[in-house]
Each structure stands twice: as C-alpha cells, then as structure tokens.
Image (cartoon, coloured by chain):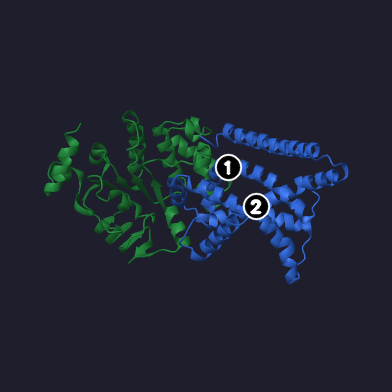
Amino acid sequence: MTVEITAVALVLGCIMGLLVGIGRLNPKKRVIYALCTGYVAAIRGTPLLVQLFLLFFGLPQFDILLPAFVCGVIGLGIYSGAYVSEIVRGAIQSIDKGQMEAARSVGMSYGAAMRNIILPQALVRMIPPLGNEFIALIKNSALVSLLTIHDLMHEGQKIISISYRSLEVYLAIAVMYFVLTGLTTLALRRIELRLRAGGMVQ
Amino acid sequence: MKTQKPIVSIRGLRKSFGDHVVLHGIDFDVQPSQVVVVIGPSGSGKSTFLRCCNGLEQADSGRVEICGHTLTDAGQMLGDQALNHLREDVGMVFQSFNLFPHLSVINNITVGPRKVRGVSRQQAEAEAMALLDKVGLLQKAHAMPGSLSGGQKQRVAIARALAMQPQVMLFDEPTSALDPELVGEVLQVMKLLAGEGMTMMVVTHEMDFAREVGDVVVVMDGGAVIEAGPPDIIFTNPTQARTRDFLRAVLTRA
C-alpha cells in the first residue's frame, strides 16, 4: 500500500507542482499568481498530519466522505505539489533569459517556447531536488497509517499489537523504508546520468 | 536614389527603463535590401533600439512599422499572436548566440519551422541542411551546441534565424562575444547574406564591416541618432563632433 499511495500521490504532486510552478512565474497575472501563492503558503505553513486529518475527519462534516485511500493520495499529493512547484519555478527561472527570447524570436508563442525549449532544459535541473522531494514523500506516507490505511507502518503496528516486539518490528519497517528510498535514489541517478550522456546538460 | 516603400519605418521611438531614458525619439527608415549598420559608444541605446524592432522590448511611445506590420504605436504593442507572426518575418541574432543547448544543431534550426510553420520534419531538415551548407557547417549537423566554437555557434544561430525565411535580419552585436580569430567567419556569412539582398540591421563594433558592407551607417549616442549616411561620408567626413570623437576612439585602438 505504501508504494501505491506514494506513486499516485507522486503523480498528483508533480502535476500540481508543474501547474502551480508555472502559475507563479509571472506576478503580473494577478489572479493566477495570488491563487498559486496562497496554495503554497497554506500547504507549506501547516503540518501534513493536520491536513490529512482535515480531509479525513473534517470533510465528513460537509457530508463529503472520501475513502481513506483517496484522502491519503490527495493529502500527500497536494502537500508534495507545493514543494514541487517551488522546484519547478526555481528550475525554470534558472534557465537563461536569452533562451526564451531566442525561442520567441523564431516566432514561437509563450506556450510553445515553454514546452519545446524551456521545460526540457529545466527538467534536467529539477531532477536532483525532485529526488529529495520524492524521498520525503515516501517517508511522509507513514502518516497515512493514521487514516486507517494499511500501509507499511500500519501493518507493522498490527504485528506489534500481537507480538509485542516493538524494537524488531520498527527496525524492520525502517529497513523497508530505507530500501524504498534507496531504490528511488538509484533510479533518479540513472535518469540524470542518461540525460547528461544525451547532451541535455552541459 | 530610388524611392521605394521602406521595409522598416520608425517614428519618434522612445523607451525608458524606470527613470533612465534610453531612447529619445528615433526616426529612421530602412529600404528593402539595405544593410544598416548601427554604431556608437556602449550605453548609447543601440541594442535597445534593435530589440524594439522585434518586440523584445516594448517602446513607450512612437511608431514602428516593419514588414507591413505595425509593431507598436503610441505605446500599444501588437497582440501576442500577431507578434508571433511578425517575428517569423524578422530574424534575430544575439550576442550570446542563445542556441538551444538540449537540441542538436539540425534540431536547433528545424524546431522553428516545424513548431511554428508546421513544416514536415523531412522538408525542414532538407532546408536546414541547405542553410548549414551556406554557413559552412554541414558536417556539424548532428553535433550538440556545447561542442561548437563560438564562431560556429553564431553561424548556426544565423542559420536558425534564416530557417524562418525572414524578410529582415537583426544582428545584435553578433561578434562581440567571440574570440578575435573567430570573428571573420561570422562576418563572412553576414557578407554573403548582404550580397544576396537580405535587409539587415546590424549593431556592431566592427568598423571594417560597417565600411565595407554597410549601405547606411547610423551613429547613435545618448539614445539618439546623431548622424546617418553612407559609410564613406561617415568615416571620412563626419559632420558631428561626437561622431569624430567616437571614431577616433575606436579606430586608434587597433
């Protein structure tokens, strides 16, 4: 369950992050900029556990009853999206201004220049910080055990309640998280190396 | 002198960044196939003037007409879509090349025609190869920009701009970031273009190029055109004291 919930939350987080990150590029588009900035401030300024509880225990008061899994995915995804958006924005802004000017000068629209020229270059620069974010997300997913989701942590606690072997079980859980994060790190490292070898980065 | 309809027409162009006035009302026309070379001390507004001609900078007031489009009029810039169309007609070459580092040389050239004009990959590549041949870089078609010298990069950048089949080419100090021994190869390509009848506006410090290739030399200082005329008059018998000072400063350096 930990893998599924993290994977879906990851996808959600990346989509949110990309949209919000781009939304925060231009403060002159006031409404979009204000919405995106508000989202980032609210999510980064409050604990993830509180956000998850708001979704799971708060929403039912408005008769919105979401399954625990959906709450977990949305909670983690939205949380992660706020951090990803800052990574996206930073990477895009680190691309030389001349790239956008050159792309616009051959007649590309802002959107076409973003898709064809800016984002492919920014993506490579996003990978290392995104790796950090993914690892944080995997570890944060332990919190969803408190929403009755049967993830790694939740299962471990069930075993402890029968066996009373806290130390061994928690150590085993720690090792499993370590393996998950380790695999993620390796996978991202490979992608980065491949892009570098492909000449995407100078 | 033939009286043709100018391809670029600029009237009362003004531009400031904050309190700093960069352009104080510029009036200027460019005839088709003319090579206009803009010279002047740094900070005189040459680059800003050029960037106002394809909408990279927005003029505060005045009127710029180029290739039949009214780019800007009284501080009102053309809409975004029309601006994209205008830029297909006006090629730009930058001091810092600004090649797309994640694309191979050939893709740098084809990305514009393919994404903007919807040309097929096959046709775009055939045209790109012809342009690479013209700038003498056929063998570098599949190299990445990072592996090219500055002079080669700038020649690719020229080919990239030409791929959109522009009517006017703008050059913003195309050789200023190059090692001295690489300047010649870029100027050679620009001479070739001039010989083919391309309308060009060139901001440069290369006085020999101005003298040899320019039809009109424009001297700018302090955000205004102080003198404009054929190179043999500007270089041998300038009327303005500031032109003489500037030319003495650059020409005695060598």
Q: Residue at x 74, y 63 (%)?
A: A57
Callouts 2 and 1 on one subunit: yes
Alpha carbons under labels 2 and 1: distance apart: 14 Å
The reply to whether the C-beta atoms of the residues labelled 2 and 1 are less than 8 Å apart is no
Sequence order check, earlier mark of 2 and 1: 2
Residue B59 position in % (x across, y down):
33, 60
Q: Is residue B194 left or right of residue A192?
A: left
Label at residue A13:
2
Amino acid on which disc 2 is placed: Gly
**Residue B6 seen:** no
Q: How many marks?
A: 2
Query: What shade has chain A been given?
Result: blue
| Above or below: residue B136 compared with residue A66 | above
* Along the line of sight, the residue nearer the viewer: A192 or B151: A192
Residue at the far bottom in the pictured view? A62
Query: What shade has chain B been given?
Result: green
Residue at the far right in the pictured view? A162
Residue A168 position in % (x across, y down):
80, 36
Q: Residue at x 27, y 59 (%)?
A: B19
Q: Secondary structure at mark 2?
A: helix
* Along the line of sight, the residue nearer the viewer: A40 or B76: A40
The quarter of the picture where residue B2 lies is bottom left
The quarter of the picture where residue A189 lies is top right
Label at residue A129:
1
Q: Secondary structure at mark 1?
A: helix
Residue B48 position in % (x across, y down):
31, 52
**Residue B186 seen:** yes
Identify the chain of the residue marked 2, using the numbered disc in the image.
A
Amino acid on which disc 1 is placed: Pro
* Along the line of sight, the residue nearer the viewer: B108 or A84: A84
